[in-house]
Amino acid sequence: MMQELCSELNKKNDSKALVLFSSGLDSVYNLLRTKKEFEQVTALFFDYGQKASSQEYIHVKKVCSKIKTDLIRIDLPWYKELNSSLLNFSSKIAKFTDAHEADLNKNVSEWVPNRNGVFVNIAGAVAESNNIGTIVIGLNKEEAERYPDNSKDFLEKSKSVLQISTLSKPTLLSFSIDMDKQQIVSELYPLMKEFLLSPNFVWSCYESFEKMCGSCESCVRLKRAVSKNLVENEWKELFLK
């Protein structure tokens, strides 16, 4: 019986992909790349009590509706009890004048304990349950220098875990793993035009204000990237400052 089950689950559908999607720069890029490479694409959004969750979910739904992509939402309320400035509303998120200042900051205060590890394993269960052969996650080499769960090592070892933690053995990939934010913006622009998306479909802020705050680490990295691509005028109205 188990042998028959394994055989059936291993017939994974390689035309189907599940994308971890938060509406941030990396995840928008990876979702659009996935839409071009796979026939059936599903976005997976996690609400884990993050301060940005309300704005993220608004933008996630806007993108998925615009490009006609199925969406699954999973809530992880227990995450709120863990220690992170992204989760605890009594803790302030670090603010910076520019991305260079963020690069030099030694305090990785916006770390969320094992976040991508948890996300990948839940995605593995969702993929296996829905006969999806590929999981896509938005990682990049720029943030990998500060956050180990953005690294190529994390990606490769997580792939290995899925090979022994599931019967269907979905693969894990990231289209942006070897890119920095500047490169992601450069490659995202033609994709956004193709899918009729404008910059206001992106939410790359740790906060949930009416606009992106413009001074958290995620915002200043995005602002540097758009400036280097000479498109800052198209984004400046999306930030508070």
Image: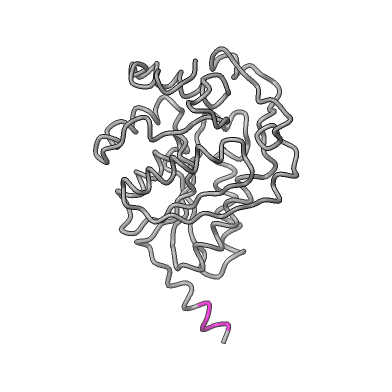
- Say which of 153 and 20 sits in front: 20
Is 168 situated above or below 112?
Answer: below
- The residue sitting at the bottom extreme is 1
Q: Nearer the viewer, residue 76 or 114?
A: 76
Query: What is the magenta range?
Result: 2-6
The total number of labels drawn is 0
**In percent of the image, x 47 and y 38: which residue is there?**
177
Measured as percent of width and height from the top left, residue 121 is found at 60, 56
> Percent x, y for residue 51?
61, 36
Residue 202 located left or right of residue 162: left
Is 7 on the left or on the right of 227, as rendered? Answer: right
Q: Nearer the viewer, residue 231 or 2?
A: 231
On screen, 12 above or below 36?
below
Splitting the image into 4 quarters, where does residue 39 fall? bottom left
**Image coordinates for residue 217, horizontal then vertical, percent:** 57, 24
On screen, residue 69 above or below 202: below
Q: Residue at x 69, y 28 (%)?
A: 109
Q: Main SS type for the magenta part?
A: helix
The residue that appears at 31% across and 47% down in the rendered structure is 67
Q: Residue at the front extreme?
A: 210
Location of residue 124 in the rendering, given as x and y in whole percent from the top left corner: 55, 60
Q: Is residue 129 magenta?
A: no
Residue located at (35% from left, 43% from top)? 32
- Check the image and tell me how it is coloured: one colour
Name the quarter where the N terminus is drawn.
bottom right
